Image (cartoon, rainbow, N blue to C red):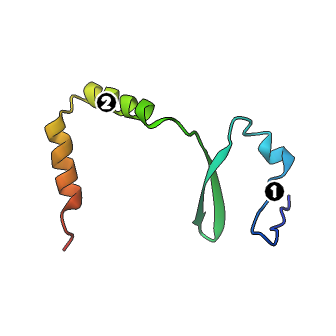
């Protein structure tokens, strides 16, 4: 299937492709090996995602001090 890029850098996805993702309104766009990759994403309110994260942390037995330690580790300067 072909898709043409317009003068405004827009591409219309073919109907056959769009039918495979009926609920997707947004796509994450990236490049890998000179290929354009579109991954459908679901946009959710921040508070609902935060609740999911807190539930997962509880299931894993993580505490706030674990998160603080992970943040400190991630922010360390690489040598």
Q: Residues within 10 Å of mark 2 (few under 14, many from 20)?
A: some
For label 1, the residue is 12
Q: Earlier in the sequence, mark 2 or mark 1?
A: 1
Residue 66: x %, y % from top left: 17, 40
Q: Residues within 10 Å of mark 1 (few under 14, many from 20)?
A: few
Q: Quadrant of residue 25?
A: top right
Residue drawn at point x = 84 percent, y = 51 percent: 14
Residue 38: x %, y % from top left: 65, 54
Find the distance from the CA under tag 2 to the CA under tag 1. 39 Å
- What's the mark number on residue 23? none
Taking the image as shown, residue 29 lies to the left or right of residue 78, namely right
- For the residue labelled by badge 1, is the local secondary structure a helix, a strand or a loop? loop
Q: Quadrant of the N terminus?
A: bottom right
Q: Are marks 2 and 1 in contact (CB under 8 Å)?
A: no
Residue 59: x %, y % from top left: 28, 25
For label 2, the residue is 54
Taking the image as shown, residue 20 lies to the left or right of residue 70, namely right
- For the residue labelled by badge 2, is the local secondary structure a helix, a strand or a loop? helix
Is the residue 18 above or below the residue 48 in the image? below
Residue drawn at point x = 63 percent, y = 50 percent: 27
Residue drawn at point x = 21 percent, y = 70 percent: 78
Taking the image as shown, residue 18 lies to the left or right of residue 69, namely right
């Amino acid at each position: 299937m072909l898709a043409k890029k317009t003068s405004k850098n827009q591409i219309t996805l073919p109907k056959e492709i769009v039918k495979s993702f009926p609920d997707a309104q947004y796509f994450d766009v990236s490049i890998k090996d000179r290929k354009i990759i579109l991954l459908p994403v679901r946009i959710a309110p921040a508070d609902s995602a935060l609740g999911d994260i807190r539930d997962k942390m509880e299931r894993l037995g993580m505490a706030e001090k674990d998160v603080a330690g992970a943040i400190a580790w991630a922010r360390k300067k690489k040598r």
